[in-house]
Image: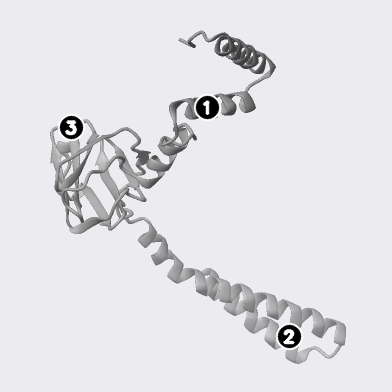
Amino acid sequence: MAVSEELQKDLEEVKILLEKATMKKIRDALTAEKSKIETETKNKMQQKPQKKDHLDNDKPAAVVAPIITRYSVKISNYGWDQSDNFVKIYITLTGAHQVPHDNVQVHFTERSFDLLVKSLNGKNYSMIVNNLLKPISVEGSSKKVKTDTVLILCKKKVENTQWDYLTQVEKECKEKEKPSYDTETAPSEGLMNVLKKIYEDGDDDMKRTINKTWMESREKQAKGDPEF
């Protein structure tokens, strides 16, 4: 006899006893037993379709392609030069010519460009250059991929102009390194300005050396001797 049939038979017997019972204590016990049998019968009935689900779970799982995580490398080494019409940026990347054409992407704006080379030797390479020294033509700019090299061609918006630097930031950094004296002043005044700046920034030894040199120079001038 199946388990469900036995439970159903037990349930009918409990119902008959429950109809005949008069004492509250006995009725409570039979009512609890009745609920227990009904719950167990319900659980058994629910287990039947689960067998099919179990069989379905035995089917081979669909094959999911593994997710490949590639490291990103920022490009910091490059060279550049220019012609009358273009500023040319050279980036050396071994094997760049072997990746699909669409894997080398360059986006231009009037004052910037960014390069992305995907899936090169298991890595992604990127380079972003902002604040170009002068505006470029977005439509006229392009890229070329050569053996182990990516060439970026920035079309000058104003042709036949000379770029002294690639970016505005580079220009500002270089200008800060220049001496602060006015180049239009007399050489002696310019030298004095340089010595003054060195004196102000120098330590005690440097200041003593400058003072000594200054005193010796003044003594020579008083004697009429040339300084050099």
The amino acid on which the numbered mark 2 sits, given as a three-letter code, is Leu
Using the image, determine if residue 10 lies above or below residue 223.
Answer: below
> Which quarter of the rendering shows the C terminus?
top left
- Can you give x and y, in whole percent of width and height, for residue 81 in the image? 21, 37
Q: Residues within 10 Å of mark 1 (few under 14, many from 20)?
A: some
Using the image, determine if residue 199 lies above or below residue 112.
Answer: above
The amino acid on which the numbered mark 3 sits, given as a three-letter code, is Asp
Residue 17, numbered circle: 2
Residue 1 visible (yes or no): no
- The front one of 79 and 174 is 174
Label whose residue precedes the other's in the sequence (3 or 1): 3
Residue at numbered disc 1: 194
Question: In this rendering, which labeled residue sits more in front, label 3 or label 1?
Answer: 1
Q: Residues within 10 Å of mark 3 (few under 14, many from 20)?
A: few
Give the residue displayed 58% in from the left and 79% down from the top.
8
Q: Are marks 3 and 2 in contact (CB under 8 Å)?
A: no
- Can you give x and y, in whole percent of width and height, for residue 143 in the image? 17, 47
- The front one of 98 and 222 is 222
Q: Are marks 3 and 1 in contact (CB under 8 Å)?
A: no
The amino acid on which the numbered mark 1 sits, given as a three-letter code, is Val
Say whether residue 73 is left or right of residue 181: left
**What element does badge 2 sit on?**
helix
**What element does badge 3 sit on?**
loop
- Can you give x and y, in whole percent of width and height, for residue 29 in the image? 80, 79
Question: In this rendering, which labeled residue sits more in front, label 3 or label 2?
Answer: 3
Residue at numbered disc 3: 148
Label whose residue precedes the other's in the sequence (3 or 2): 2
Give the residue displayed 54% in from the left and 71% down from the top.
44
Give the residue displayed 33% in from the left and 37% down from the top.
75
Label whose residue precedes the other's in the sequence (1 or 2): 2
